[in-house]
Image (tube, helix red, strand yellow):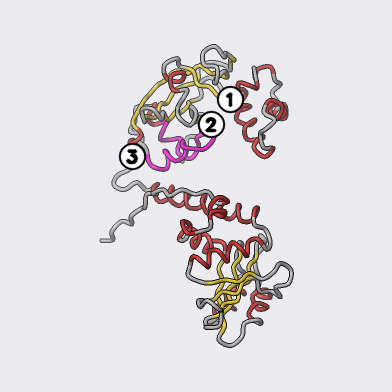
Amino acid sequence: MANQERTIWGIHAGKTGDADTLFLKKKFVGVGWPKCGNLGNLPPDREAFKELVAKSHPGKKPGAIPGCAGQLYRFVHEMKPGDLIVYPSRRNHTINIGRITGPYKFNPDLEPTYPNLRCVEWLKTVPRTQFTQGALYEIGAAMSLFQVKSYADEFVAVVEGKPPADVPGKDPTVGLVAEEIEQTTSDFILKQLSKELKGHPLAHFVANLLQQMGYRTRVSPEGSDGGIDIIAHKDELGFEPPIIKVQVKSGGGSIGDPDVSALYGKVGNGEFGLFVALAAFTAKAENFARSKSNLRLIDGSELVTLILQHYEELDSRYKGLLPLKKVYVPEALEEAEE
């Protein structure tokens, strides 16, 4: 359980650790945003911070402004002297834990790109290998400034001179980290498909995916498909079985038995029905499909699995829509039973 008695912040020094010297040598932690000027001139009001970010960065997407402004607000008004701060250095691959010792100050002379500063006293520097994978994942957050909560106890233990992580044998957090990474990727893919390929365009994407699985496909014209979005087949002309009639749904609500039954009603003898949806299917819909040997349902979760399996073969426009790179994720091994 995370330590609840003291606030612990996490902070990054840019993507390449460009403020590493400022942090570790000059003993200041800082956030960038020099175009915002002296944040101490703003009232302690989140809306004022949002307005400043929007005004000083007119090219910033509106959806990103609250998050950026929130980090600046927390650095100025929520961070307090005495709070602990964790800085994972990219340059020497260490975890540095310190204590905030002073109020917010604005000083662009020390490091022009990091003018918003807090004095820090560094207490401990330890190798990354002394922490659980879960703790490392938490402080690897995408944000520049964030609060450490889930694994706060590990960092407090280091400050108190205790072993940072009492984890005998296998690290139990490895599986949790791997699962969270996979879920984050799945959420990203489904959100992108839902936002960028809403409606009939998703049928073209599914057709491209089926092509990479060895099928030839014909996509019905928009608005006149009669409930069938794609015809898939193995042979070049589409005469030889199996003939697969595919319906695609991009909506967010669960797909019920009436929709699945309607598709099956259009499946003739010797044909197969395939229902692909970004959302989930209801229990009744799944039970109906299980009772039909020539009907198959693919929900959002399974669709993501298929996308990842055939990602490299997808059309370039879809890989541009879903920019992914291959990474190796640690796999948690089950303890052998005696």
Q: Relative to the observer, which residue lies in front, 173 or 263?
A: 263
> What residue do we see at 45% from left, 16% from top?
27
Mark 1 crowd level (few <14, some 14–19, many ≥20, 10 Å Cα): many
* 87 relative to 65 in the view: left or right: left
Residue type, mark 1 in image: Phe
Residues at discs 1 and 3 in contact (Cβ within 8 Å):
no
The correct choice, above or below, for 93 with respect to 280 in the image is above
Q: Is residue 142 magenta?
A: yes
Span colored in magenta = 132-156
Which residue appears farthest toward the top when viewing the image?
A: 109
Residue that carries the numbered disc 2 in the rendered image: 144
> What residue do we see at 68% from left, 25% from top?
56
Residue type, mark 3 in image: Asp
Element carrying mark 1 = helix
Question: Which mark is first along the chain, 1 or 2?
Answer: 1
Residue 72 drawn at (x, y percent): 61, 27
Q: Relative to the observer, which residue lies in front, 277 or 271?
A: 271
Q: CA distance from mark 2 to mark 3?
A: 28 Å
Residue 332 drawn at (x, y percent): 36, 52
Residue type, mark 2 in image: Ser
Q: Is residue 116 magenta?
A: no
Q: CA distance from mark 1 to mark 3?
A: 31 Å
Disc marking residue 166: 3
Disc marking residue 191: none
Residue 89 drawn at (x, y percent): 41, 28
Mark 3 crowd level (few <14, some 14–19, many ≥20, 10 Å Cα): few
> What residue do we see at 49% from left, 18% from top?
28
The correct choice, above or below, for 329 with respect to 232 in the image is above
Residue that carries the numbered disc 1 in the rendered image: 75
Q: CA distance from mark 2 to mark 1?
A: 10 Å
Q: Relative to the observer, which residue lies in front, 226 or 240?
A: 240
Element carrying mark 2 = loop
